Image (tube, rainbow, N blue to C red):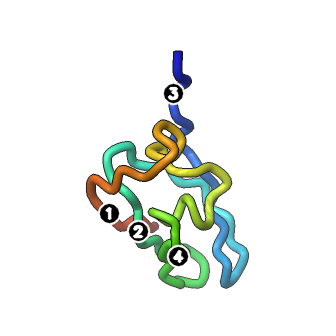
Amino acid sequence: MQASPILESALTCPHCGCVTVVTMPTDACVYFYECPRCKALLSPKSGDCCVFCSYGLVKCPSVQEAGACCAKSVTRAGP
């Protein structure tokens, strides 16, 4: 039996160090995230599917479940 994915991750802005707990969608990759403090627009590092895989404490649900991103759709998150 596979455990349910963790749906919250703490994103850390690489520009200002702001840490924000964000609920991850289960049906889309979050490709852009605007930092609520410095307003920097984060996008995934090369080789990552989403901002959670690059800047989060917890990888996105797709990677948690399948070990790879499904990239069904892309969305933008922010404050």
Q: Secondary structure at mark 3?
A: loop
Q: Which mark is residue 56?
A: none
Q: CA distance from mark 1 to mark 3?
A: 22 Å
In the displayed structure, does residue 51 sit left or right of residue 71?
right
First along the sequence among labels 1 and 2: 2
Identify which residue is drawn at 46% across, 71% down. 33
Q: CA distance from mark 4 to mark 2?
A: 12 Å
Q: Which mark is residue 75?
A: 1
| Residue 56 place in picture, x, y as percent | 62, 59
Q: CA distance from mark 1 to mark 2?
A: 6 Å
Task: Give the residue at the far left of this rendering.
Answer: 73
| On screen, residue 36 above or below 67 | below
Q: CA distance from mark 3 to mark 2?
A: 23 Å
Q: Secondary structure at mark 4?
A: loop
Q: Amino acid at mark 3?
A: Ser
From the image, state whether disc 4 or disc 2 is nearer to you.
Answer: 4
What residue sits right under mark 4 in the picture?
46
From the image, state whether disc 1 or disc 4 is nearer to you.
Answer: 4
First along the sequence among labels 3 and 4: 3
| Residue 13 place in picture, x, y as percent | 64, 74
Q: Which mark is residue 4?
A: 3
| On screen, residue 47 above or below 27 | below
Q: Secondary structure at mark 2?
A: strand
The one of 44 and 37 positioned closer to us in this rendering? 44
**Screen quadrant of the C terminus:** bottom left
